[in-house]
Amino acid sequence: MSAQVHHAKPAPVGGPLLNAVTLTAGVLIAIMAMILLVRFFYGLGSVTHLNDGYPWGIWIVVDVMIGSAFACGGFSVAMLVYIFNRGEYHPLVRPALLASLFGYTLAGVAVIVDLGRWWNVWNMYWPWSANPNSVMFEVAICITLYIIVMWIEFAPTFFEKFGMNEAKRRLSKIMFLIIALGTLLPMMHQSSLGTLWVVLGQQVHPLWQTPVVPLLFLLTAIITGYAVVLFESCVASSAYRRSIEMHLLTPLAKVMLGIVVAYLVVRFADLLWRGVLGLAFAATLEALMFWLEMACFFGVFLVIGTAAQRRNPARLFLGGILLMLGSSLLRLNGFLIGYDTGGGYQYFPSLTEILVTVGMFSIEVLGYVVITRRFPVLPREAAHA
Amino acid sequence: MNSRREFLKRAAAGAAGAAILGAGGTASARETHKVPPGGLGLLYDATLCVGCKACVAACKEANGNPPEFNTVDHLWDTPLDTSGYTFNIIKMYRNGTMETKDAETNGYSFMKVSCLHCADPSCVSACPVSAMTKDPATGIVKYNPDKCIGCRYCVAACPFGIPKYQFDDPFGRIGKCELCRHRHKDGHYSACAEVCPTGATLFGSTADLLAEAKRRLALKPGEKTTYPRGRLGEAKAPGVTWREEPDQSYEGTVGNYQQHIYGETEYGGTQVLKLSAVPFEKVGMPKLPPYSSAATSETIQHTLYGGLVMPVAVLGALAWVAKRNVKPEAEEGDRS
């Protein structure tokens, strides 16, 4: 069978759970917990710089929008393996899925923390409160379903750990449906995360306000998915002193660059078609941020544009970071930098706000370390280092 | 084997492409909604406003909102903008020596800032839990705190910056003008219009208010005309009988109006209308297209997800492809 390529079965990495990384993450999480306590007793205004001109800050734009884009590795790789039948990438699926699982679960947690009236959140799933016209309604339902679907997709890892072979066998029979759902749902909500700003109308700068924004978000989500896999594979290899899966990452980077080209074509065709490209040459903060965003997508070709460059792990790592940054800037620019409701409002996150975002990412790091050390996620090393 | 693989790839790519391209389709483009026939609203005429702010105080009282202090002595309510606790405010335009009222240069003027009750409100389209709704009969944009999850998408969406959140309260709500609908059952209408001493703020049906606005724009600046106060005409709201009021109209001088009724076309029309002698952009009213962003947003959403047709079709295609590529457990056994 075409997907049947020989590769190592996943195995726990092993090693101590208590080390400098997990300890630091633990401290940062504790700090976040204290800040959140204040937030729940004294309101959002007590720990954030949110205001009526910028009702969404970094908890939404970074933790949810960017955080969930970073969590697209699982979806991007699974799509490559199971939909486009590139079985050779199979060893990348589990680690990518794990990062996605954490990314999305925490995006969900971050939303609850940011909700001003969180105790009413059940209305989101209450049919008599549903508003199918609302982009956010669609995003919320899709993300909730996707988190459930991902836990099911990841369940074999736990089944293997606890020797539940019968459960694993049964699940594998319907796995194709779970994988199909796990591909469809992120396509839906990652594009809709962009559609969220369409209703904001002319408050969003024309360099970002466009009816094709769902396509821009979808493409950058897929790109970020692959970029994160490059980034994580390099970090995991260096942190765990494992050999790097260059035979997979090099061709993966080429696939990723192909999508970057498609993205840039759509991005500039849209700007030209709407006749707003001229705004990119105005002396404004928005124009500067636009070119920073573009520099990431163009710059990646200087870093890993040639086949030889793509065989260099350091370059793949850097290329991954560049594209993660570019996709982050698209989201940051549309929702915060290029958003102006008028009335002279200002927003820059407070220290406590930043520490909560740091804490959220720390949970991801801690969870990733604990699970990869104790559960079969990363491919087994031939010779244990 | 290779040809089948090619075929599957194309099938998947085709399905994904169809889903994406759907976004560009305009087949089911949704038109911007119109003001309902019985829509209620306000007419604010800046040339009649004397800046007494009786409406600001009355609004606070009617909605049970606390004062907000922006002076050192904390003597009285001094909000600088609408907020989660201030649903209505009179802002001032100042230029040069400020000698003449309603003059663009060396003059001053006023502008009422409160919810315009859009025909096609962004906040209603944005709200994921139907906490923000538009009343089908009166067109009032209503807020229900018992449904609201506090996501503040309405705050971000409104082109007028109207819904505001109470950030200082752990149980904070969204605050905005609801045309005093809670007072309608007692025969009271919007408190701001009820107390306005000059009739600068009038309450009525948007159709009547629009006719009145057009009447004023047709008059010659400087001539005399009769200005109503309080409520204009028999604005009808289901189950509501307005309290009896004496005729409060008076004779006044016609202002030097801009030939523009703000809210007649802005954003597809609003139920609150405004007249001014100073250009609207100068007094803080945004220049907006004659359609609502809610229509654009919902066109995209319903093109992609209408009846769940596209998602189900794509899911079918993906499942079909995945079924062939995912190895069942038995075959996977020999992999290790």
Image: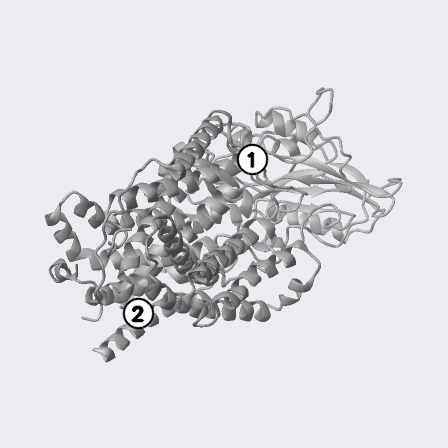
**What amino acid does circle 2 point to?**
Ala
Q: Can you see residue A245?
A: yes
**Along the horizontal axis of the image, is A301 left or right of A91?**
right
In this rendering, the answer to whether B300 lies above or below A152 is below
For the point 57% across and 46% down, which residue is it?
Answer: B158
Asked whether B203 or B156 is in front, the reply is B156
Q: Which residue is mark 2?
A: B12
Q: Quadrant of the C terminus of chain B?
A: bottom left
Q: Nearer the viewer, residue A171 or A226?
A: A226
The crowding category of the residue bearing disc 1, from other C-alpha atoms within 10 Å (few below 14, some 14 to 19, many at least 20), is few
Q: Position of residue B206 (x, y in %)?
A: 60, 46
Residue A324, x across and y down, in percent: 47, 56
Q: Are marks 2 and 1 in contact (CB under 8 Å)?
A: no
Q: Which of the 4 image quarters holds residue B79?
A: top right
Mark 2, mark 1: which one is toward the viewer? 1
Judge left or right: residue A272 versus residue B327.
Answer: right
Q: Quadrant of residue A48?
A: top right
In the rendered view, would you say B125 is above or below B81?
A: below
Residue pictured at 82% horizontal, 51% vertical: B220
Q: Is residue A16 left or right of residue A276?
A: left
Q: Tell me if residue B19 can be seen.
A: no
The numbered dot on residue A351 is: 1
Q: Is residue B50 left or right of residue B138?
A: right
Tell me the kind of residue under disc 1. Leu
Query: Image point 55% across, 45% down: which residue?
Result: B156
